[in-house]
Image (cartoon, rainbow, N blue to C red):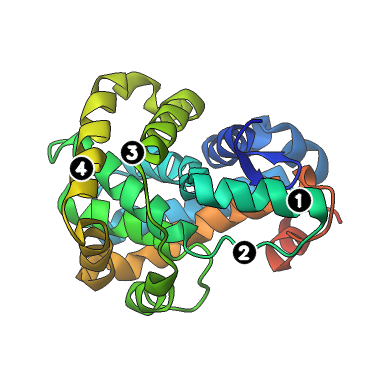
Amino acid sequence: MGLLAWCNHDLCKHMESCEAIVLSPAKHEEVSKRCDADFVSLEIGSTVARLAKALNTQAELVKELIATITCVHDIGKALAELQQRLHTGCGEGKQISLVGHELISTWFAYNLLESLGSTKVQSHVKAAMAAGVLLHHAARRSALESYLKLSASLKGVTEDDVVKMVEHAFKCCKTLARYSSIKDEVMARLLYQLKVPYSVLDVIRFIANNMYSKYGELVAYVIAIADNIDAHYTRLDDSARGVLITRFCKV
């Protein structure tokens, strides 16, 4: 069985689709057919511009980073325990909770950005981008509030989980194709931190307390647009329908 993002929703396809929506809404099949692609593009573009100005960073780089971060925002769902919940719950029609996957995705995203190096991504930009992952299910909440609410839900991560996450990210995210050389470093960072007590939570706590985490809300907004559109038109139910869908798309 492949990794799932949700019932009837392949994780890799979800990652690819979300990334594609951020990069070019008009070229995305579902967006072009069912949504106002120009409106989606304008909203993402204006948010990228606001974030670039706030972070004093080139808009082109900000858009590329948000696309990558959007691609990996659900990578925490690759954990064996969460996949077991999905496969069992979907098959038996049980209620499923994946609360806490945001923490693992945030940890992964930050280490991915760290591996790109300070010459590529400055520290305040990394913090804002990673905070966006932390906030992608936390509307109107600060990164610190999200961390405090979710920290009790953090699940144990195994070395096998790390390998799956890294392999999946570099297979499914097109924006990472040119950075294949950092794959081993990302793997090494994550595996090392697993061996250090509290290291995973320390990384997430650092992001949550960073003064630039407030800009994570802008990143989270772009993630939510792509996530909700892809989820709504891929899943076989209306669980992902919400304000963003009715704003941008036909329902």
Nearest to N terminus: mark 3 or mark 1: 1
3D distance between C-alphas at marks 3 and 1: 26 Å
3D distance between C-alphas at marks 2 and 3: 23 Å
Asked if one can make out residue 6 in the rendered structure from this viewpoint, the answer is: no
For the point 38% across and 77% down, the residue is 142
The residue identified by callout 3 is 159
For the point 39% across and 35% down, the residue is 160
**27 in relation to 21, above or below:** above
Q: Secondary structure at mark 2?
A: loop
3D distance between C-alphas at marks 1 and 4: 36 Å
Amino acid at dot 4? Glu
Coordinates of residue 120 in the picture (x, y in percent): 19, 36
Q: Secondary structure at mark 1?
A: helix
Query: 249 or 176: which is nearer to us?
Result: 176
Drawn side of residue 173 relative to residue 188, left or right: right
The residue identified by callout 1 is 90
Nearest to N terminus: mark 1 or mark 4: 1
Mark number displayed over residue 97: 2
Query: 170 or 3: which is nearer to us?
Result: 3
The residue identified by callout 4 is 114
**On the rendered image, what quadrant is the N terminus found in?**
top right
Amino acid at dot 3? Glu
Query: 71 or 25: which is nearer to us?
Result: 71
User: Decide: marks 3, 1 in contact (CB < 8 A)?
Assistant: no
Mark 2 or mark 4: which is in front? 2
Drawn side of residue 17 relative to residue 102, left or right: right
Nearest to N terminus: mark 2 or mark 3: 2
Query: 179 or 22: which is nearer to us?
Result: 179
Amino acid at dot 2? Ser
**106 in relation to 68, above or below:** below
